[in-house]
Image: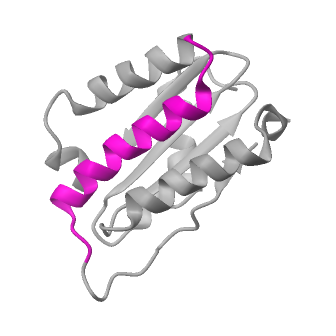
Amino acid sequence: MAELAFTDQEKEQIVGAIREAERDTSGEVKVHIEKNCPQPDVMDRAKEVFFKLGLDKTKLRNGVLFYVAMDDHKFAILGDAGIDAAVPDNFWLTTKDTLRGYFKAGQITEGLCAGIRMAGQQLKSHFPYQSDDINELPDDISFA
């Protein structure tokens, strides 16, 4: 099971990064970890997981998914329409390059936390926290 690839402390670090990223924004960040990607195209799988986790249901369409298939060494970052339209054109590529650098060094947790922080900065900039905001999705890591 993919969950076993992370210690309790690493899981806490990732959830902490999610909470920190969401603190000053209405945006939602989710991390989904699997052992293998069951589809040939990692983006197709990330889209499937995106919808399964309800990231397309946020009020402002500002959900972000970090998808990782551990044994296949594949990952994807997917932002919903609202955040995708707001970030600079190269943002997702730059974020992916940051994660790739950490991942190549075997630093999966650190890479996810760095990417989550990058997404959080953009979410905060384009979707600042409002007094009536609610946490629309749980901050936990999804494992399959």
Q: Which residues are magenta?
A: 105-129
Give percent across and percent down for residue 11. 69, 47
Q: Is residue 138 above or below residue 101?
A: below
Q: How is the image coloured?
A: one colour
Which residue: 71% across, 34% down?
Answer: 34
Using the image, determine if residue 93 lies above or below residue 117.
above
> What residue appears at the point 34 percent right and 81 percent down from the top-left corner?
133
The mark tally for this picture is 0
Q: Examine the rendering and report whether any part of residue 80 can be seen.
A: no
- Which quadrant holds residue 40? top right
76 sits to left or right of 74: left
Does residue 128 appear to the left or right of 30 in the view shown?
left
* Position of the C terminus by quadrant: top right
**118, above or below 40, in the image:** below
Coordinates of residue 73 in the picture (x, y in percent): 63, 15
Q: Residue at x 67, y 38 (%)?
A: 33
